[in-house]
Each structure stands twice: as C-alpha cells, then as structure tokens.
Amino acid sequence: MLPLDPIETVDVMAKSGALDTIRIYNTLIRASMKCNRFTQALQLVAHLRKHHVRPNIVTYGLLLDVLNKAGRLDQAKKMFSDIIEKGTVKPDLHIFSTMIDACGRNGDIDDMFVLKAQMASQNMHPEEVIYNSILSALSRQKKVDLQMVMKVVDELVRCKPPIRPTVRTFNPVIAAFASKSRTDGLSSSELQFLKAWYARISDKYYVVKDTYLYGLAMEAFANSKHLEDAMLVYGEMMRHSETDGSVLWTFTGSSKLVEILMQLSIEQQQFDNVMKLWRDWNTLRTHVSESVVKLVLYACDQGGLFNVAQDIVVSLLTPSNTSSAGSKNTSSGVVHGTEFNPKAVGEGTLALYIGMAIKHDMVDSIVPTMDMWRVSVLTPTEPVSAKAPSLADVRMQLSNAGSGRRLSVDTVRNIVQLLLQNNSVSKNKVEAAGDITDQ
C-alpha cells in the first residue's frame, strides 16, 4: 500500500508547478500496479492527460500493462494500434511482450501470432520472454495443438542470435504434452519429441528441473503407457530431492500422480514399482488415500506378498502409541511403518483384504484385523485385541452390542467376485465368505 495518495500527490505538484516530468507519473503508476490498484493507475493516466503531460515509451508500456491486468484487452489493442499508426513512440520489446502475453492469456492465439509477426516488421528479434508467453498460451488451450507447440520450439532453437531457454520455457512445453496425453494420447512422433526434449533440458541446456516439470513429464509418459520413461523421471526426481526437497511438492501435494504410476505398473505387472512407490510415499510421510492403499494391496496379492498387505492394513488401523514397530521386516524387505489412518481402510479396502486372506489361506488373520477395523472406526483411541479363532466368528464380532457394524451385502459381493476371478479358490472358500453378512 502506498504511504501517500498518488492522485493527491500529483495534484499538489501540479498546482505548485513542480510536475514537469513524466518520470513522476511512471513511478506512481508502477507503484499502484505493484499494489494491484489498477483503478488508481488508470486515474493517474486520466490525470496525466488532463495536465497535458506527454507520455513516453515507458508510460505506454505501463498503460498497456494496466489495461490488460484490468481486463480491458480491447482498449489495450486500440492503444497499441494507435501507437503503431500514429508513430507516437516506437514500440519496444516490453510493449510487444505485454501485448503478446495479454492476447495469449485471453485465448486470442491468432492476434498473438500477428503481434509476433509485427515484431519482425519492426526489425525486432523475439527473446525468451516472448516464446515463454506463446508456449504458455498454447499449453493452456482446451485442445492443445502439439504440432504448433513443436513448431514454436523448433523456431526457438534456430533463432539468431541464439536464445537460451529456461525452466519457464520448458514447463509449458511439457505441460502441453501432459494436457494432450489426458484426452487423446500421444503419437509415436510426439513421444519421441517429448523424450528427446526432456533429455535436452539438462544435457544440452543445463536447466535445473523444478517440481512442476517433473510432475508434468511423469504424467505425460504414464498417460501414454510408457511406464519405463515415467519411472526414469520419477527416479531422477527422487535423486534431486536429496538436495532440494521442493521438487517433491507436486508429487506429494495429492495422490493423483502416485495413483497413475501404480495403476500403470499393475497393468504392466511391474509390482516391484508399486512397492517402491509405496515405500517412498510413506518415507515422505505423505497422507495416504484409500485408493492408493487398494492399489498397493492388489499389487501385494498379485505378487504373493500377503504378509506385506497385512502389515500395511494393521499399521493403518493401529494408533502410533500402541504400535510395536515403526517398520516391519517382511518377505519384500523393509516396509516403512504407516501412520494411523483408519479412513484409508474403507469397506472396499477391507473387502479386498479379506478376499486376499481367504485366497492365500490366511483366514486366522481376518478376525483380529476386522476387530481392529471396527474399533478404529468407532473409537480410534481404544484399540481392542480380538481373540476369535475362526472366520465363522467374524459375523458375531461385528454384531456385538454397541458396534452395530456389519459388512454390507455389496462388500461381501465384492469379496466373492474377487475370489471367483481367481481359479485357484475353491467353492467352499467362497461359501465361507458368505458367512460374513446376513443374506
């Protein structure tokens, strides 16, 4: 916030005859913009014209910026046209950059390229900031034109004098590929371009990747079913995080990316990837979602790691003050302890776990786990150890006085469906699963 009202300031200076330079207006307009006071900046413009102060190139750059940020693109375009037609001032890089960025942000792609062509007619060479604005605008389109993106990138690297791209240049490029991969997928030529340019970011241009670039690259490769490339990006990000933890912000901000990578790993039967992602996820102490837990349990099932699945579920249902260990040794190695989070074990996850227990002949683990689940959902601070010896007692445990909690019919149907999908499960085991609920 400005310490003095700028309008009052220029009024006093004008009355005293001290207002004889445009630099004062430029300073006050710039200060107003820094405070996001665009209306105040426009009032200064009106004051400037009232006192017949002639604006210079800096003033016009500020005025165009004010109009664009105030959402008055049409007025900015008219002012720019007047500058060109009347030759009031010769537009500089800042003016062109302001107008190109404004057109791009408003989705006016055609005028954006017209302005770029006008730069050439003024014998001006576009610099990094111009290409950054163009690439950002192209990446924000609802239907991304990757051919245009690749054309602009190709033009950028051929510029004379050469332009040195930065991470702000590469982020919108990778974002464009990620955007298209979500809807239409990437062609083989587009994937080759993406792989080549991802490698050049560090190898040729020595640009330090940031959290957004890693996240977008992983998403683009994973959506295109290129698991190996996605995991290579993931591995690079994890190594980078050893010296700069900020590169993990996008990855840990939500479970979206880890879910995409886990799902693809399961589809391609790369269950070790799922377990690696799970270990890293827990090492980072990131909040665990139920969808992630389901994917991990499924990977454990397919990989024959029921003990690991049991370890995960028990950890999620056991408060930290009652847990006997922060990590447990299992057949897969060390699985880092998971923080108490019963919300991550909903009925769907529980159904999956029970189905796994029956399938792998570990029915004795069901009742204790069920009791922990029931107690952690109803009274998370008072875990009780169940001693029921068999699957037949599950129904009784769930219907104890005060709990009122039974598995729903839909949950049991999910269990039965899971069992029937595996030919090795006998009919009597499927029938046993039916004892969990009332029919």
Image (spheres, rainbow, N blue to C red):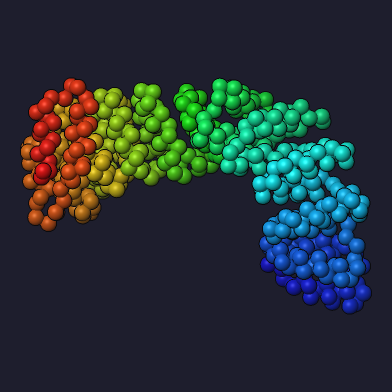
Of residues 428 and 272, the one drawn nearer to the viewer in this rendering: 428
Dividing the image into 4 quarters, which one contains the N terminus? bottom right
Q: Is residue 16 left or right of residue 356?
A: right
- Residue 123, relative to residue 222: is it above or below? below
Is 392 rendered above or below residue 374? above
State the residue in front, 204 or 189: 189
What residue is rendered at 83% in x and 41% in y?
Answer: 118
- Picture coordinates of residue 363 (x, y %)? 13, 32
Query: Relative to 94, is 174 above or below?
Result: above
Q: Residue at x 10, y 45 (%)?
A: 438
Residue 98 x %, y %: 75, 49
Q: Which residue occupies 71% across, 32% down?
A: 152
Quarter where residue 339 is shown: top left
Which residue is depicted at the point 72% across and 58% down?
72
Image side of residue 177 versus residue 421, left or right: right
Count the labels in the image: 0
Horizontal side, residue 66 vs residue 406: left or right: right
Q: Position of residue 360 (x, y in %)?
A: 18, 27
From the viewer's side, name the closer residue of 438 and 3: 438
Picture quarter with the C terminus: top left
Quadrant in the rendering for residue 35 = bottom right
Work out whether residue 192 or residue 390 is closer to the camera in this orientation and state it. Answer: 192
Q: Position of residue 267 (x, y in %)?
A: 37, 26
**Residue 401 visible in the current orientation:** yes
Q: Quadrant of residue 151?
A: top right
Q: Is residue 218 visible?
A: no
